[in-house]
Amino acid sequence: MYICLKYMEKHKSGFVSIVGNPNVGKSTLMNAWVGERLSIITSKAQTTRHRILGIISGDHYQMVLSDTPGVIMPNYEMQSSMMDFVKGALEDSDILIYMIEIGEKKMKDSSLFERIKTSKIPVLLLINKIDTADQDTLLTALEYWKEILPEAKIFPISAITGFSVKEVLNYIIKILPEGSAFYPKDQLTDKPERFFVNEAIREQILQFYSKEIPYAVEVDTEDFTEEKKIIKLRSVIMVERDTQKGIIIGHKGSALKRVGVGARKTLEVFFGKKVHLELYVKVNKDWRNNSNQLRRFGYKH
Ligand SMILES: Nc1nc2c(ncn2[C@@H]2O[C@H](COP(=O)(O)OP(=O)(O)OP(=O)(O)O)[C@@H](O)[C@H]2O)c(=O)[nH]1
Ligand SMILES: [Mg+2]
């Protein structure tokens, strides 16, 4: 009797987390691998505030990626919750991706870095943004990091140009543990549709407003009604103070309108449908330090 080995390939699955300093390109890499804009990307630090799963499945594997907030030393309760997402991701991963950008020397929280350094699971160190550096800078970085993290497998990559992005994915699939799938094979993420609406609006706010404004903002989508040809949305932009409300709205509502138009365009591509978006602005005093509000917005469980 013949048994064809090809068809006996064992199924692999595992949790893979991407952690690192803010703005190094974690979300850019996750989106490139998943092939969807699951995480918002901006040039500002602390763009990602939640742990966002991106599920990548093939016939013989499933890799459950976690994109996480950039590591910081928290000033607000919200930021402490963001760091709890990072710690949670470190705790339940099978494989850890520690992403740095070229030129970077250390993590913003040394105790978290110690955990990565002494981690019992495989660690991949991805040196991102190599499209911005010359060969000498890269060689210096490789030598530096080999000494700091001798156990890690190091890959220089460019998440934006795609350099080595596929190779790293193939390597991870190779070392995933054996096991069955955790999620249905056609599922892409754990987050509900409203989450992506909130994030698309926050992305516009991060892009358009300067200084503290984007960090004082939270978005809550109160109504999500899907009809045959259109999705109707009503979302509230929450700020901490009256002065911030005025800035968000702008002269005769012009600034708010710009946010709405930008978010609508993003969401029409994301959902593949026409979108009608109504935006409101409300003051929610000191929400970043209020446990109940943080629970309501999904920062605490
Ligand atoms: N030149 C270059 N820029 C990159 C690369 N990858 C990401 N970026 C840019 O770096 C900035 C930050 O990217 P994100 O993916 O939002 O970074 P992040 O690590 O998720 O940031 P946080 O969510 O704030 O922690 C954006 O402007 C990206 O376009 C890369 O390979 N090369
Ligand atoms: Mg991010």
Image (cartoon, rainbow, N blue to C red):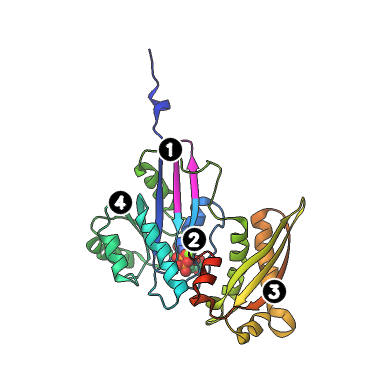
Amino acid of disc 1: Ser
Classed neighbour count for the residue bearing mark 3: other residues with Cα under 10 Å, few (<14), some (14–19), many (≥20):
some
Mark 4 lies on a secondary structure that is loop
Residue bearing the label numbered 4: 122
Instruction: Give how far apart the Cα atoms at labels 3 and 4 are.
Output: 46 Å
Mark nearer the viewer, 1 or 4: 1
Amino acid of disc 4: Pro
Amino acid of disc 3: Tyr
> Going 41% across and 67% down the picture, which residue do you hit?
83
Instruction: Give how far apart the Cα atoms at labels 1 and 2 are.
Output: 27 Å
The x and y percentages for residue 267 are 66, 60
The x and y percentages for residue 128 are 40, 62
Amino acid of disc 2: Thr
Classed neighbour count for the residue bearing mark 1: other residues with Cα under 10 Å, few (<14), some (14–19), many (≥20):
some
62 in the magenta segment: yes
The answer to whether one can see residue 6 in this image is: yes
Per the picture, the main secondary structure of the magenta-coloured stretch is strand
Instruction: Give how far apart the Cα atoms at labels 2 and 4 are.
Output: 22 Å
In the picture provided, is 111 more to the left or to the right than 6? Answer: left
Instruction: Give how far apart the Cα atoms at labels 1 and 4 are.
Output: 20 Å
Mark nearer the viewer, 1 or 2: 1
